[in-house]
Amino acid sequence: MLCSMFWPMLAIALGFLGIAVLGVLGVRVFLEAQRLGRQVAATAERVNRAAEDLERAATGLARTGEALR
């Protein structure tokens, strides 16, 4: 009798454990995706600032070139 109850209970326990592990991994993936999103946003802001700096420098250089003519 005991043996006939052991395997179904073990299967239920292992199934619950598997779902718990998948839940923990899902939370970790979600948190890492958020972190990556913040890094991408920060990098995009830095690229935009660098592009604006380059545009200002190019404008100044073009004015200097026009003044030398």
Image: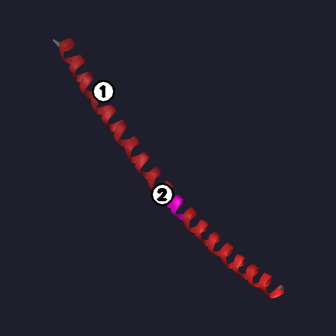
**Residue ID at (50%, 54%):** 36
In primary-sequence order, the first of circles 2 and 1 is 1
For marks 2 and 1, give the CA distance. 34 Å
Of tags 2 and 1, the one toward the viewer is 2
Specify the label residue 14 is tagged with. 1
Residue 39 lies, in percent from the top left, at 54, 59
Q: Quadrant of residue 23?
A: top left
Quadrant (top left, top right, bottom left, bottom right) of the C terminus: bottom right
Q: Which quarter shows the N terminus? A: top left
Q: Position of residue 8 (x, y in %)?
A: 21, 20
Residue at screen point 48% across, 57% down: 37
Residue 10 located left or right of residue 30: left
- Residue underneath mark 2: 37
Q: Residue at x 28, y 29 (%)?
A: 15
State whether residue 48 is above or below residue 4: below
Q: Secondary structure at mark 2?
A: helix
